Amino acid sequence: MSPSLEPIDVTVGRGIRDRRVVYRHTGVFDGTELTVLYLVDDDEHQRRKALGVEAVTDERILAALMELPTDDLGLLPERFRLIFQSPTACNASVVIDDPDGARWGRRLIQAPVEVLEIQARARTWARGSAIAHRWVGYGPRIVWIDKVPRDEAFLLTEAAHYGIGLVHGDEGRRLIAPSCYEPERWTSARWRFAELVYDQFLDAISIA
């Protein structure tokens, strides 16, 4: 699927943060079709163009990069030494050897997008919630359903329990908002998802 970018209206998205623009697009992520609403960090986007670094979707490389500071040199963990021999890791960092044989490094990149919403479309709540559960911990989740069951109160209670937002039909009637997303820490898995979104963003702007 070739993603089609949809810039969000200026009153909604633009200007939320300096040098960032909100986009929405639908794509396939690890075999699942999702619609993602996200902020693009233009400073990071331009930095990567200068470095020759596109989307980094190898979680091992991201885990290694997370071990390095961005404002100083840090000791390179022994277990990641081989990873920093890859061209992608080399372009995304600076690594030097000291006279004693230790290796030090600094990370040059950060997450290029911030995921604001993850939306899954399904005919029923059962199918939609199954999709949403796969993406817990990656951002606020919303399920669009085509059909609301008779027991709407039970449906809303279950959605609220799992922190999943609910939207009904093509008109987008919002039944319940997703719970506030406040992750305790940044992980390589979350960074990889941001890179998957960025990868599709790059594909979309290349054919626009």
Image (cartoon, rainbow, N blue to C red):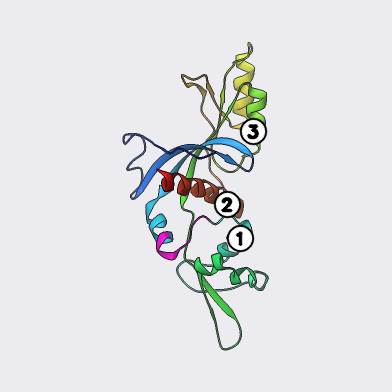
CB of mark 2 within 8 Å of CB of mark 3?
no
Say which element carries label 2: helix
Say which element carries label 3: helix
Q: Residues within 10 Å of mark 2 (few under 14, many from 20)?
A: many
Instruction: Give the residue at mark 3.
Output: 131
Check the image and report above or below for 131 versus 156: below
CB of mark 2 within 8 Å of CB of mark 1?
no
Query: How many numbered marks appear?
Result: 3
Q: Which is nearer the eye, 198 or 63?
A: 198
Q: Amino acid at mark 1?
A: Ala
In terms of sequence position, does the residue under pointer 2 or pointer 3 come before the other? 3
Residue occupying the point 54% across, 57% down: 56
Instruction: Give the residue at mark 2.
Output: 192
Quadrant in which the C terminus appears: top left
Instruction: Give the residue at mark 1.
Output: 63
Residue 36 lies, in percent from the top left, at: 50, 38
Q: Which residues are magenta?
A: 49-55
Q: Amino acid at mark 3?
A: Ile
Q: Is residue 204 visible?
A: yes
Residue occupying the point 60% across, 43% down: 137
Check the image and report above or below for 131 versus 29: above
Residue 203 lies, in percent from the top left, at: 47, 47
